[in-house]
Image (cartoon, rainbow, N blue to C red):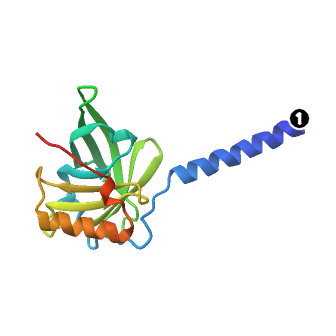
Amino acid sequence: MKTSKILWVAASVALVSLYLTSCSVTIPEGAQAVEPFDQDRYLGKWYEIARLDFKFEKNLNQVTAEYTLNQDGSIKVKNRGYDYVKGKWKESIGKAKPVNLHDGNGRLKVSFFGPFYSGYNVVAVAADYKYALVFGNNLDYMWILSRTVTIPEDIKADYLDRAKKMGYKTGNLIWTEHK
């Protein structure tokens, strides 16, 4: 009886710890989110220009992200891409919220899996909101986005330079193909 109670407490502590670490909403050390950040101007369709690959985007091209405002003030996130290996479209729907509603910066938390959030940090955005550089929680997640399927070379070079200075391995970027 005593052993099962100890195991139950240990399992509970482990689950809470797992939950808290899986809900990590951070920004890489030394990075600064855009401030002021205009959430309304950020809404709309973005084309992924480049990313650090991860399992949910593996083998995807023609990747887009569309952000629309929900009635509750959160942001609907619709990611879509073509899996060129399986020959079919893949889509994920999630939601985003500001990390701190009153900070006015580009730090958001995004969830595609219920209560589990991760960091989505807009660290650079063009004055006209046509191009953006986004860092995830850590140096494993990064995206270069554009309102069109291309990005000017000077913006691309600036974003790559910023990422390199932060420690990102920009040589590992996947350059998304669009048709």
Q: Is residue 19 above or below residue 56?
A: below
Residue ID at (37%, 69%): 166
Residue position marked by numbered label 1 in the rendering: 1
Q: Residue at coordinates 13% horizontally, 60% vertically from top-left?
A: 130
Q: Quadrant of residue 87?
A: top left
Q: Position of residue 70 (x, y in %)?
A: 27, 47
Q: Amino acid at mark 1?
A: Met
Q: Is residue 103 visible?
A: no
Q: Quadrant of the C terminus?
A: top left
Q: Quadrant of residue 101?
A: bottom left
Name the spot of residue 117 as percent of width and height, x first: 44, 50
Residue occupying the point 38% across, 45% down: 54
> Residue 93 lies in what quarter of the image?
top left
Of residues 40 and 124, the one nearer the viewer is 124
Q: How many marks?
A: 1
**Please, which residue is most extreme toward the top here?**
87
The answer to whether residue 61 is seen in the rendering is: yes
